[in-house]
Amino acid sequence: MGELSVRELPLFPLPEVVLFPQEVLPLHIFESRYRIMLQSVLETDSMFGVIKWDPNTKSMANVGCCAQIIKHQTAEDGRSNIITMGQQRFQVLEIIRSTPFCSAMVSWISDENIDNLQTLDSLKDSVTDALSDVINLTSKLTNTRKKLPDKLPNNPMELSFWIGAHLGGPVAEEQQRLLEERNTYARLQREYEMLDHTRKQLAARTALKESFPDIKEN
């Protein structure tokens, strides 16, 4: 990412999309301004910022995630398909250009140091157990074989980002809060609360299904 803690970064605002570190995000580039942006970043370090755009308030979030282009393919009509990987999170300090594409001065952000690593590891284990239960209960209810990925992150911060990225449903606002959180323990704690709530709901539905197998769920 370089030595500088502050740099200029082209921004790609996306509605209802929150990118997390180490997550893959494929994008289709077709607007002329973003074609220009793509050409510009490919000529430099292949980095740009993905940031959540609110179409209702016409405003960008203040925190986003840097995306690095790892693969790109441009068609004859100028449209491009790119594969990006989330890198470091950033905070927007100042918008310095809005045409032909948005560009800002940003500062990199990271999580605070945690003193009690044993407590953090214990919470990580609880989160992993809750996640496993949610997957298993979902499999029972849907009669499918769902399982956790073999390479689920073991590092607490990386696990918290992975869970944030894989929340189901229209959860961009919650994902944005998790992305902005700068305390790994607090992020994992919030995720545990969500997973535990889901686990209890699924357990109740599973018990109902097993007790009354002829009842069809909506």
Image (tube, grey):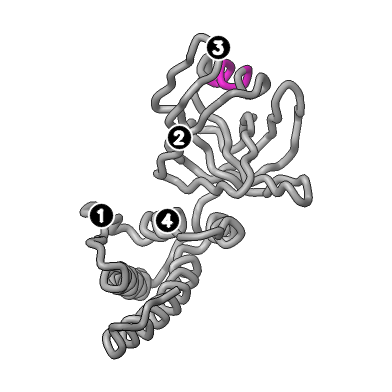
* Circle on res. 149: 1
Q: Residue visible at 49% across and 71% down?
A: 190
Q: Position of residue 122 (x, y in %)?
A: 32, 75
Magenta highlight range: 36-41
Distance (Cα) linking label 3 and label 2: 19 Å
Q: Position of residue 213 (x, y in %)?
A: 28, 83
The amino acid type found where label 2 is placed reads Pro
Question: Is 61 placed above or below 101 here?
Answer: below
* Residue 121 in view: no
Badge 3 or badge 2: first in the primary sequence: 2
Distance (Cα) linking label 2 and label 1: 20 Å
Q: Residue visible at 46% across and 60% down?
A: 168
Badge 1 or badge 3: first in the primary sequence: 3
Badge 4 or badge 1: first in the primary sequence: 1
Which secondary structure lies at badge 2?
strand
Left or right: 62 as drawn, with respect to 69:
right
Q: Residues within 10 Å of mark 1 (few under 14, many from 20)?
A: few
The amino acid type found where label 3 is placed reads Asp
Left or right: 144 as drawn, with respect to 218:
left
- Viewer-side residue, 212 vs 125: 212
Q: Which residue is mark 4?
A: 166
Question: Is 142 placed above or below 176 here?
Answer: below
* Circle on res. 26: 2
Q: Residue visible at 43% across and 18% down?
A: 73
The answer to whether residue 189 is magenta is no
The prevailing secondary structure element of the residues shown in magenta is helix
Q: Which residue is mark 3?
A: 77
User: CB atoms at circles 4 and 1 under 8 Å apart?
Assistant: no
User: CB atoms at circles 3 and 2 under 8 Å apart?
Assistant: no
